[in-house]
Image (cartoon, rainbow, N blue to C red):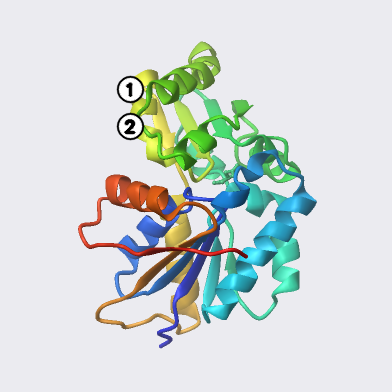
Amino acid sequence: MNNKPIGILDSGLGGLTIWHEIVQQLPHESTVYIGDSANTPYGVKSPEEIFELARKCIEFLLTKEVKLIVTACNSITVSCVDQLREAYPAIPIVGTVPAIKPAGEQTKNKRIGILATTRTTTSDYQTELINQFASDCTVLSHGTDGIVPLIERGELASAEMTATLERELAPFQEEGIDTLVLGCTHFPFVKVQMQKILGSSVTILDSSEAIARRVTFLLEQSNSLASVPKPEYAFFTTGNAAIAKKILHATIKRSETVVVTEVSL
Ligand code: DGL
C-alpha cells in the first residue's frame, strides 16, 4: 500500500480529461495536477523545448512526493517520454498517445482520422503507431493548434469554437472516416460538439480510459495502490486559476468545491 498521490501533468487543462478518468477508476487515490497553461500550446514547440518544460512540471510534482507520474499530454509523450524516463529513473512515468490501436481494431470501413496537435501529427512516434496498428487502413492525420487556445481561454461552446471545429473536421468528413482518434487530451472537452458535426456514424475515441487502466495495472503490480477513505485532489496551474476552476466545474461536473492554486515553475 502507498498513500502518496499520483502526479499528473499537461501543457494546460487538457490533462484534466485524463485526471477525471483516473479518479473514476481509482476512487481511493489522491492526485496532484499541474497544468502549464502559461506556456500552452506545446503543440507548436520543438521536442527540445517541450522536454525542458515537461521537466519543470516533473520537478514540481516530485516536490509533492508523488508515487507515479502521468504525462497527460500526447505532445509531451511523443516528443520525449523516453528522455523523461531516463532523466527520472526512480519514478514510473505513464505516457499518453493517440488511441490508434483500438481505432485499427474497431473501424469497419478501414478509414480512420487522427486529430492532434502539429507536434503529435508530425512525430515519428505517431507514424510508428500507424504502421504498427493501422497499416491496413487509410489514415487521415490532421494537425491543428487552434482548438487548444480556445479551451485554455475557457471557451468550450463559443461561436469561434463551433466555427473552428467545423473547419478542422471538414477534411475528415470528406474522407468518409468511420473512426476519429482524439490525439490531444484537450479535445474530449469538445467531443459532444464534434459528434454533432460528424454525426453518429463516426466513433470518436480518446485515450483516457486506457491510461487510467495502465495506471491501475502499474500500481497493482507494484503493490502501491492507496486506501485513502477521502482522497485529496490538488490542482496547480501556471496560468489563470479562475479559468481552470471553470473548466473543472463545468465539464468534469464534480459537485464539491475544488481549489486551484497558481504557481510559477
Ligand atoms: N493536451 C496536449 C496534448 O495532448 C497538448 C496541447 C498543446 O499544448 O498543444 O497533446
**Residue 130: mark:** none
As drawn, 163 above or below 90? above
Three-letter amino acid code of the residue under disc 1: Lys
Residue at 59%, 58% in the rendered image: 95
The answer to whether mark 1 and mark 2 are in CB contact below 8 A is yes
Q: Secondary structure at mark 1?
A: helix
- State the residue lying farthest toward the left: 255
- State the residue lying farthest toward the bottom: 1
- State the residue lying farthest toward the top: 174
Residue at 51%, 32% in the rendered image: 147
Mark 1 neighbour class, 10 Å CA radius: few under 14, some 14 to 19, many 20 or more? few
Residue 235, image quadrant: bottom left
Q: Secondary structure at mark 2?
A: helix
- Does the rendering let one see residue 34? yes
How many callouts does the rendering have? Answer: 2
As drawn, 101 above or below 69? above
Quarter that holds the C terminus = bottom right
Rendered location of residue 248, percent (x, y): 34, 52
Three-letter amino acid code of the residue under disc 2: Val
Residue at 37%, 57% in the rendered image: 21
Rendered location of residue 7, percent (x, y): 50, 69
**Residue 192: mark:** 2
Rendered location of residue 35, percent (x, y): 52, 57
Depth check: 117 or 53 in front?
53
Depth check: 82 or 32 in front?
32
Q: Which residue is mark 1?
A: 196
Residue 163, image quadrant: top left
